[in-house]
Image (spheres, rainbow, N blue to C red):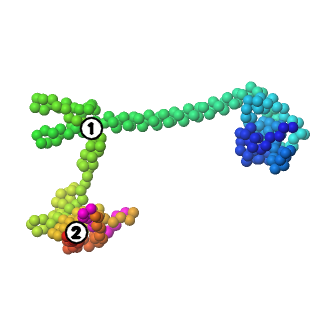
Amino acid sequence: MTLFPLMECCELLAIDPKTLRHWLKQATMSLSVHPLDGRRKCLTWEQVQHLAILHDRMLKGEEARLTTTMVQIPPLGALQEPAHPQMMSRVIVRKSTSPGELEERDLSQKLTHLQTQVEVLQRRLVLLTQDLLEAREAQLEPPNLFVQQAGEQEIMRPENPITSVPIQQGGATSRVRRLHPAEQRAQQRALTLVLPALIEYGAAGSYIIISSQEGELPLIPDSPEWFDWFKTLSSFRFVGKCGRFGTTRGYKLRPTRTWYAYRTIHQHDYKHYLGLSEHLTIAHLEAMAAKFQSYVDTL
């Protein structure tokens, strides 16, 4: 009688030790003790073959496969009764399985696995094709061409994306260089850039309020409209009698009523708490500007 340790049985059945012990418990099989080492538990070759037939497993190796297809199930009296009736029916059906049916079932499983791999590769191919088309469209997008004529710039968009575009100018033909994508992005950012509002002390002795979107605003400093206007801003610049600084609104998950003043002086960043929107009077802004200017005078 040939004995096989549990690890070798797992390799033959292509399962892990936990699954093997579960199968043995279902089949109510007992383990044999190794004749030379009592600590090692083993199975006989007949038991391994019986487990392979019960669970439709192909033993590892060509010789093992041939032996499995030709094995005869021992009488029910030689083995203990299975734990479940379904297991008994599976044993009886397995006795009549021919080698051709086993080979056909093995080929069917391999074909199903190959079909799954083909579907995965097809999906990856579709994704790669989409990425390639998007990259090509981004490269072939017609750029903006800036033509210098009489001190003015004229934006032109050619029909075909070529390296240079011929332009008729004074009877002579010249070519204009196509802009680099980084230059195009910089121009788009410059067009969409919105400068913060400006409060500036003018030469006439009054303060001018300028919005980048609405132009000059007819606001009176320290008036109710003045404080309501600050509630609509996220930042503004102040240029007063004694100095200048920039501001930004405080944030805690969303904009708050607090304001902070900042200025960079000799490569050093200064930042101070400015107060709430209702505290932003002209006198308070001028005091903060003078405070920043004192840093310039002391350095």
Q: Is residue 278 left or right of residue 47?
A: left
Residue 99 point in image, percent of width and height: 76, 27
Q: Please tell me whether residue 263 belongs to the stretch shown in magenta.
A: yes
Quarter-wise, where is residue 64 in the image? top right
Residue 192 point in image, percent of width and height: 26, 50
Q: Amino acid at mark 2?
A: Leu
Decide: is 34 above or below 123: below
Residue 299, disc: 2
Magenta span of residues: 254-267
Residue 143, disc: 1
Q: Is residue 74 left or right of residue 11?
A: right
Residue at the image position 63 percent from the left and 32 percent from the top: 112
Q: Secondary structure at mark 1?
A: loop
Residue 266 point in image, percent of width and height: 24, 63
Main secondary structure of the magenta stretch: strand
Q: Nearer the viewer, residue 2 or 19?
A: 2
Query: Which residue, as the protein is rendered here, is positioned at the far front?
Result: 36
Residue 256, disc: none
Looking at the rendered image, the quarter that the N terminus falls into is top right
Q: Is residue 220 visible?
A: no
Q: Please tell me whether residue 102 belongs to the stretch shown in magenta.
A: no
